[in-house]
Amino acid sequence: AQSVTQLDSQVPVFEEAPVELRCNYSSSVSVYLFWYVQYPNQGLQLLLKYLSGSTLVESINGFEAEFNKSQTSFHLRKPSVHISDTAEYFCAVSRDSGGSNYKLTFGKGTLLTVNP
Amino acid sequence: DGGITQSPKYLFRKEGQNVTLSCEQNLNHDAMYWYRQDPGQGLRLIYYSQIVNDFQKGDIAEGYSVSREKKESFPLTVTSAQKNPTAFYLCASSGYGYGYTFGSGTRLTVV
């Protein structure tokens, strides 16, 4: 079984500051890793994912995450945040399935609040 | 465009009443999931189905029921046995690929 720990439940930052949202996972097998974003009263949207290959993955809106196997981490970073980045962010893990349907295990979420 | 449609967006339930939340997908995904979301508790899995006419309980199935008669549809019924149903409910699906696609959610309130 897999588990996910998001180390911060809330992260307040000022606009244009850098941010890191921390995610650690536990698994006895190879994994896929995901970050989802949820805006108020909406569903979750996929932000980025690590499946294989380069350990640094990027999203189209400036976020990046690095898979660190030795530290079992998948922290999400952005060098300069905007007010519009205010949302809840969820880290998720599934076993390496070769494309088959395996359930995702989600962390409890980190609320990122960007202040002017 | 392909996606998942949840309806209604807002739903009000009286005490002792059963209500059904709709989830429809046109992504041709095999697997579908129902999650409950409460503030500060993340996503908790209620039921999931990996194939038509088959489904499994998740972590908090008590007081809920589902059916999967068609690949496209996975309705969730919140029964009167669920004593604290006020929450945000999310439906998701996954296919031969990676990760989930989520619907926009249904907010259920007991009145």
Image: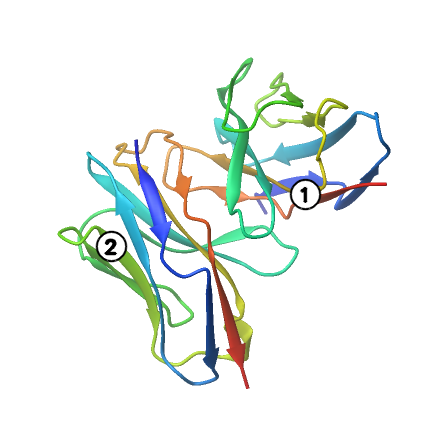
User: In which image quadrant can residue B36 be found?
Assistant: top right
Q: Label 1 sits on what residue type?
A: Ala
Residue at the spot of label 2:
A73
Residue at the spot of label 1:
B87
Q: In which quarter of the image is the C terminus of chain B?
A: top right
**Mark 1 secondary-structure assignment:** strand
Residues indicated by labels 2 and 1 sit on the same polypeptide chain: no
Instruction: Pick out the residue farthest to the top.
Output: B53
Q: Nearer the viewer, residue B14 or A98?
A: B14
Chain letter of mark 1 equals B
Q: Residue at coordinates 40% horizontally, 67% vertically from top-left?
A: A60
**Mark 2 secondary-structure assignment:** strand
Instruction: Pick out the residue farthest to the front.
Output: B83
Q: How far apart are marks 2 and 1 (CA)?
A: 30 Å
- How crowded is the residue under tag 2: few (<14 C-alpha within 10 Å), some, or many (20+)? many
From what the image shows, is residue A2 above or below residue A51? above
Q: Residue at coordinates 51% horizontally, 35% vertically from top-left?
A: B93
Q: Label 2 sits on what residue type?
A: Ser
From what the image shows, is residue B98 above or below residue B31? below
User: In which image quadrant can residue A103 be found?
Assistant: top left
Chain letter of mark 2 equals A
- In the image, taking residue B71 as reference, residue A4 lies left or right, namely left
Q: Which of B73 and A80 is in front in this view?
A: A80
Tell me where residue B73 appears, x and y as whole percent.
63, 27
Q: Residue at coordinates 16% horizontally, 51% vertically from top-left?
A: A69
